[in-house]
Amino acid sequence: MAYWSYPSGAVSGTYPNQVLTYNYKNGTWALLDDSITFFGYFQQQSDITWQQLTLQWQQENATWAYPNLDDQNLLILAGNQEGYVLKVAQDVSRNAGALQITNMALVAGIPTLTIINHNLQAEDIATNMTGYIMIENIPATDPNVALNGTIWPIIAVVDANNIQLGIPIAGTYAGGGTVARVNNILMNSKQWNLYAKSGKNFSVNRMEFNVDATAAGQLTVDYFPSFTNTSLIQATNLGNNILDTAPYPIYPLEAEQDQLWHPVYFSAVGETVQISIYMNDTQMRNPNISQTDIQINGILLYVEPLGRLQ
């Protein structure tokens, strides 16, 4: 793996806000929304015990021989603008809680979090399904302890040190809380037409997804016709196109399976059809969904030609 940290073209903060990752083995790449100011190496000197881990048992998906937990392994470190130093764990399906909440209060009646050098951008606001954060580590003595583990969209970026959320703040903040970014998934296919050479329109009726079985995972599979950015989920209101990666209750055998084939149905006809896979607002706010490690192993398209191209 190779990692590059850089400021996006629309960045308005002081620090890098995205990470480009590249897998040399299979030639794949991805963009991650996170603030990393350095990368480095570290050779771990001792094994990590369960008592030293900060994740709960149900959140830990590493194996017993996971390199990040064993001694004498060369690890990749990352650091951010607040001084946190982290181990890069490729198999952990969430962002680190590496932003400290300095204060949490009502400012002019609006719930406001003070996070020094948060580096969150205006374009991260949740209208594009990317501006979400999870609150953690608020002590039990704080009246806001119930906010631990909850996910909220950013309403506004006030300045370099303050953001606004729609959270219910009560009493005086005791300190100690942290924030973790919650990244959305966004995967876009090519604009398909398997019948272009014969001058036919393209109809997609169903897609079957082979996924690793999860406890509660979900994705939204959106689709766009004829070289447009028009979402047919929003334009036609023909279902929600949810792909469940958890076993269906009506099929008892699925609960025993490691992989599942699950369908998504479409009403897509056009000169081309493009799909887009992401999590919607409801899915992003649910930590059981947005913090789940989702693996797509294969896709089957059920298609047919329909009418001539214009």
Image (cartoon, rainbow, N blue to C red):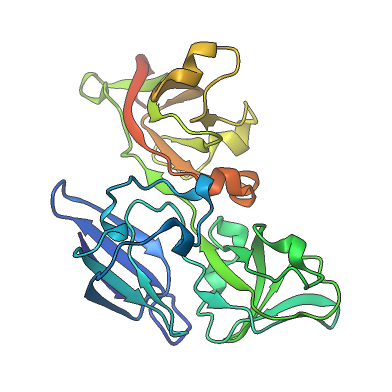
Position of residue 274 in the picture relative to residue 218 (left or right) = left
Figure check: 111 above or below 94: below
In terms of depth relative to the viewer, which is nearer, 25 or 30?
A: 25
| Residue 166 visible here | no
The residue that appears at 48% across and 60% down in the rendered structure is 51
Marks counted in the figure total: 0
At 47% from the left edge and 45% from the top edge, which residue is drawn? 229
Residue at 47%, 25% (x, y): give it: 268
Quarter of the image with the C terminus is top left
Is 306 positioned to the left or the right of 178 in the image?
A: left
Q: Nearer the viewer, residue 91 or 193?
A: 91
Residue 163 percent location from the top left of the image: 65, 77
Q: Give the position of the N terminus as an image quadrant.
A: bottom left
- In the rendered image, which quarter is residue 34 located in? bottom left
Residue situated in front as seen by the camera: 260 or 281? 260
The picture quadrant where one finds residue 271 is: top left
Q: Which residue of the protein is positioned furthest toward the left in this rendering?
A: 25
Report x, y in % for residue 46: 28, 67
Residue 93 visible in the snapshot:
yes
Residue at the image point whose x is 35% and y is 14% from the top: 304
Q: Is residue 234 above or below residue 111?
A: above
Residues 137 and 307: in front is 137
The spot of residue 23 in percent (x, y) is 19, 54
Residue 156 is drawn in which quadrant? Answer: bottom right
Q: Is residue 268 left or right of residue 1?
A: right
Horizontal placement of 76 versus 143: left or right? Answer: left
